[in-house]
Amino acid sequence: MQCMKPCSDETYDTRAFLDKMLENLDSVTYENMDPNAIPKCLKCGGKMFMNVRGGRWFIEKPYEKQQSRFQNWIQTHLDTPLLLLDMGTGFDTPSSVRWPMEQITYHNSESFLLRFNRDYPDVPKEIVNLSKGIQMDINKSIGKIYQMNSLKQ
């Protein structure tokens, strides 16, 4: 969780907040019975929300180390044959998965991008020869892959 302002770079484990909310939850109406159980920022007392991408208030700091490791991995594998599986990513946060996979494919002629997406299967024209977009629901896609693998055994 994080402050919605945000007043700092701090993020918090949700367990303690959820436990307090669940203790005060009416099991019939699912209404919170104690206003004090609603999470408030431990620093400024402001509103709290999950640390998920959703606006300018999102705190990136917890992900910077992972981002750096991912960038290093990409640089290390630019000439390595790769099969990239894009399983249902859309445009809510394309900078997290969708665009990096397209960039890896563009810069690595030894890679192939396989994109499963019900609504947005398209791939950029620059990588059309190194990729395939399959317009299919992700659950059906995984089921078909599983069935194909089962038939081989």
Image (spheres, rainbow, N blue to C red):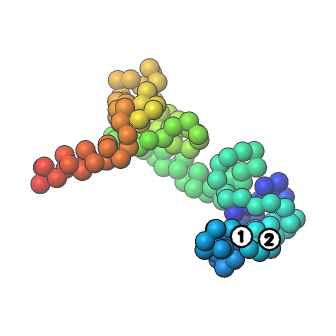
Residue 149 visible in the current orientation: yes
Q: Is residue 25 above or below residue 44?
A: below
Circle 1: residue type: Asn
Kindly report the distance in space between the C-alpha atoms of the residues bearing marks 1 and 2. Answer: 7 Å
Q: Residues within 10 Å of mark 1 (few under 14, many from 20)?
A: some
Judging from the image, what secondary structure is the residue with disc 2 in?
helix
Provide residue 80's location: percent of width, then percent of height. Answer: 36, 42
Q: Point out which mark residue 115 bears.
A: none
Judging from the image, what secondary structure is the residue with disc 1 in?
loop
In the figure, residue 39 lies in which quadrant?
Answer: bottom right
Provide residue 41's location: percent of width, then percent of height. Answer: 81, 66
Circle 2: residue type: Pro
The residue located at (86%, 66%) in the rendering is 45
Residue of label 2:
35
In the figure, residue 25 lies in which quadrant?
Answer: bottom right
Q: Is residue 94 left or right of residue 141?
A: right
Residue of label 1:
32
Q: Is residue 58 above or below residue 23?
A: above
